C-alpha cells in the first residue's frame, strides 16, 4: 500500500482488521527522503561551515603561502559541499542507470554513509 497517511486512515476506518503492508518502492522512497536526505544535507552543511571557518582564518597579516594553502582547503570544502548538494538524484536512480560521471558521486555518498555508521553510537 502507498504510505500516504490518508490511505492509512481510510483503511483503518473501513477495514479495521486489515493488516497494512507497505511496498518496497514506497519504503525506499521514504528512507531516501527522510534518512539519506538528512545525512547528505548535514554533511554538506558541515563542509560549508568548514569552508567559512577556513576563510575566516585568513587575515591581512597572513603570509602568502599560508593564504594560498587556506584558500585551497576552502576550495576543496566548497567542492565537497557542491558534490553533496547535487548527489540527491544519483541516490534515487538505479545504480545501473548512472552515467559515467555519476558513479563517483554515488561512491562518495556510500563512503560517507559507511563512515557515519561506524561513528554513530
Image (spheres, grey):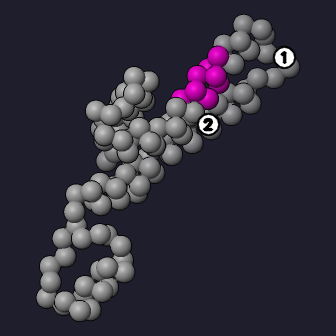
Residue 117 placement, left or right of 75: left
Q: Which residue is mark 2?
A: 48
Dot 2: few (<14), some (14–19), or many (≥20) neighbours within 10 Å?
Answer: some
**Of the residues under marks 2 and 1, which one precedes in the sequence?**
2
**Residue 103 sits above or below residue 41 on the image:** above
Which-is-in-front pick, marks 2 and 1?
Answer: 2
Residue 35 placement, left or right of 44: left
Q: Decide if residue 112 is in sight here.
A: no
Residue 24 placement, left or right of 85: left
Residue at (67% x, 27% y) in the render: 54
Which quadrant would residue 24 be assigned to in this image?
A: bottom left
Magenta-drawn segment: 72-80
Question: Does the magenta run of residues contain 76?
Answer: yes
Asked whether 94 or 16 is in front, the reply is 94
**Residue 76 sits above or below residue 10 on the image:** above
Asked whether 75 or 11 is in front, the reply is 11
Question: Residue 47 appears at what percent x and percent y?
Answer: 56, 34
Question: Residue 58 appears at what percent x and percent y?
Answer: 76, 23
User: In the image, which disc is placed on residue 61?
Assistant: 1
Quarter of the figure with the N terminus: bottom left
Question: Residue 41 appears at what percent x and percent y?
Answer: 51, 46
Dot 1: few (<14), some (14–19), or many (≥20) neighbours within 10 Å?
Answer: few
Amino acid at each position: 500500500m502507498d504510505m500516504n497517511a490518508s490511505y492509512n486512515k481510510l483503511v483503518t476506518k473501513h477495514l479495521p482488521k486489515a493488516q497494512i503492508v507497505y511496498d518496497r518502492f514506497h519504503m525506499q522512497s521514504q528512507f531516501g527522503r527522510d534518512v539519506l536526505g538528512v545525512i547528505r544535507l548535514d554533511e554538506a552543511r558541515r563542509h560549508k561551515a568548514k569552508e567559512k571557518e577556513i576563510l575566516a582564518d585568513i587575515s591581512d597579516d597572513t603570509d602568502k603561502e599560508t593564504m594560498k594553502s587556506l584558500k585551497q582547503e576552502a576550495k576543496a570544502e566548497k567542492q565537497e559541499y557542491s558534490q553533496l548538494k547535487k548527489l540527491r538524484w544519483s541516490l534515487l536512480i538505479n545504480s545501473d542507470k548512472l552515467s559515467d560521471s555519476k558513479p563517483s558521486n554515488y561512491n562518495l555518498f556510500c563512503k560517507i554513509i559507511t563512515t557515519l555508521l561506524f561513528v554513530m553510537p
